[in-house]
Image: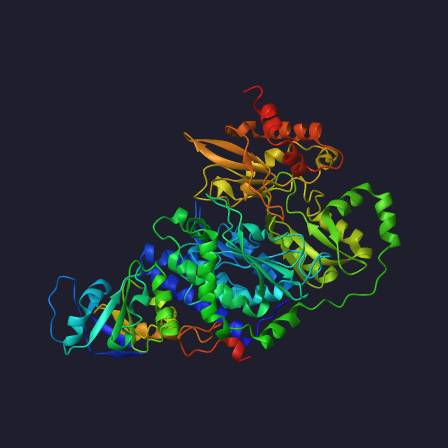
Amino acid sequence: MKVIKNGQPEEKSWTHLADEEPSQTGPCTVSLARWLQEKEELLKSPNAVGVRLSAADAPESLATDLDAISLIVLDMHPFTDGRPFTQARILRDKLGYPGEIRARGDFLRDQMFFLSRVGVDAFELPEDVDLQDRLKAFEEFTVTYQAAADARRPVYTLR
Amino acid sequence: MYQYDHYDQTLVNERAAQFREQTRRFLAGELSEDQFRPLRLMNGLYIQRHAPMLRIAIPYGLLSSRQVRMLAHIARKYDKGYGHLTTRQNIQYNWPRLEEVPDILDDLASVEMHAIQTSGNCIRNTTSDHLAGVAVDELEDPRPYCEIIRQWSTLHPEFSFLPRKFKIAVSGSQRDRAATQVHDIGLQLVKNAQGETGFEVLVGGGLGRTPIIGVVIRPFLEKAHLLSYLEAILRVYNRYGRRDNKYKARIKILVKETGPERFTAMVEDEWLKIRDGMLLDEGELQRVSTFFQPHDYLELPSKEAGLEQHLLSNAEFAAWYRRNTVPHKVAGYRAVILSLKPHGTPPGDMSDSQMDAVADLMDTYSFGEIRVTHTQNLVMADVRQDQLFDVWARLKLLELATPNVGTATDMITCPGLDFCSLANAVSIPVANAIQALFDSYDYLYDLGDIRINISGCMNGCGHHTVGHIGILGVDKKGEEWYQITLGGSSSNDASLGERLGPSVPRDEVPAVMERIFLTYRDLREEEENFLETVRRVGIQPFQERVYESH
């Protein structure tokens, strides 16, 4: 697994625990369902905890837990399901989540620019991808018409 | 009309470059069919029966002569010498080669055009009134808002992978010529009690398999909130629209299944949270509006002696004037509709040489601009009355002066089975067979205003459900049959047509039409038009006449 964070390759890796899998040392993520069930126990561990959202999950379920969560993973599958784009906006704009939001799963290189605009700041990629090529995906557009969750300014404020 | 600045141009150039790279990756096997599909669709590229079909965006239907010349060039160089105008005011080409599409996009970018979001599950071309800016019944020109919506929706990072396609139409006139009630979002400019102009917001209209008339979810929206309200609607849709069944994925199904009241509450709730953070920028609205100021019209008399003379002495010209020109809000001018429905040709098709010639006419007679109508015709909106006769004579040579606008032979048709891989049945030959019923204009004019819409399958690209007469092609054990509906409309009095009865085989469609026309002629009262008669008497008399010998 390779990770790009804030436009840079990153080393730190997370273990994504399946619901039945026992906890491990080191940073782990769990599904939203497991989080809601086991959060008190999970928070006792010294390890950083992240939560994985599937496209159907409501980010608002995490509203009161955001301070305790170090990573939110948006599981994308299939890539044509656009709900994670809205989940990211809700986490950033409405819930004010400042931590890492990571896209994982079945997303295309061609969606990474859009994902970076809605608030996703990290991307989990298969080992065999060319990271340098993926990094270029963020630079395909230098003009953005609308405001989103990123720092890119909408064109009308520049005119 | 709107002119790109270097930001607009850069974005379109960058999009063309991105698609060139995507096409290269697909052809090199780096992108699978499934991965490439949504990417190419978001650039208007379908894989069709014979070849790819490329749909090019014409924002709210408005074109400059320079752009029309480029469309002619594309038809010549990359296609078989013609293009097809669509019901969403776009143009599509049926014969480009996939490998050449990036070159076409570069050519388009050179004249401020593109194919962005002309297909796919994203926000499509914003459509509008083809008489915007010149209509006598206009409250306010809707085009600045269309352009603002175009920019907001272009490469929208959150709404590019929606459950299904999403279409917005804006109308600024009393008479709805933009079919706003059958769009995912319809915006109608209205005045409130304080005399301020804002938008009535309709949601959940649409044609296709489940035709539905939109519902008003906000009777008056202040202009400053236009984009925040659209964003709230799209966010609710992106989140809750169905993704388990593509035939139930349009927003109309969400509105229906949620219930309009609850859906409205969800939108309003979302909107309250975001509206103050995304007010429409006053300066930007003003900047965009400057591109849609009235042309430098001359002061002309409203009565023109030369025109009056021609109308009296030339019956053919007079017929064209009556059917194919409409009043203009400035005295001495009229809007001229170019009929792309000459009898016996595919409705909405235009050749490269016609495009080039029309571009010249636009420059000479109509400030270098033209509009595409959602009924697949063109409008030169600003023609001087004293030049109408010349314009008519020139259009006649180009076969663009068929005096049939609004009549039974001015049909909307989809490309049908001849071109489209979705279709069950042909559309164009059916349209041509109906046109062949009319060997005299007297008969056509006697029937008056009739909208006949033909779709080759239930996806409804030919808008059959809102035709006064709708014709839908169905597959019956490998044979082409047609289901007829009566009483539909997409105007202010929007309604869905009612099924006349069992479908009929292709070769019987013209005879059935004849019986419908004759029934109308027998039953109409005074000046009543076809739709009014159907609404008054119901479909039963038509059923009896059509099926009496079956």
User: Which residue is nearer to you in this view: B151 or B101?
Assistant: B151
Name the side, left or right, on which A107 lies relative to B72: left
User: Which residue is nearer to you in this view: B17 or A98?
Assistant: A98
* Residue at 24 percent of width and 76 percent of height: A68
* Residue at 36 percent of width and 48 percent of height: B245
Q: Which residue lies furthest to the top in this view?
A: B549
Residue A19 occupies which quadrant of the picture?
bottom left
Q: Is residue A96 above or below residue B351?
A: below
Residue A60 visible in the displayed image: yes
Residue B155 visible in the displayed image: no
Residue A134 occupies which quadrant of the picture?
bottom left
Q: Quadrant of the C terminus of chain B?
A: top right
- The location of residue B262, given as percent across then percent down, is 44, 55
Name the side, left or right, on which A108 lies relative to B254: left
**What's the coloring here?**
rainbow
User: Which residue is nearer to you in this view: B221 or B418?
Assistant: B221
Q: In which quarter of the image is the N terminus of chain B?
A: bottom right
The mark total stands at: 0
* Residue at 57 percent of width and 61 percent of height: B59
- The location of residue B238, given as percent across then percent down, is 40, 60
- The location of residue B523, given as percent across then percent down, is 69, 29
- The location of residue B433, given as percent across then percent down, is 60, 33
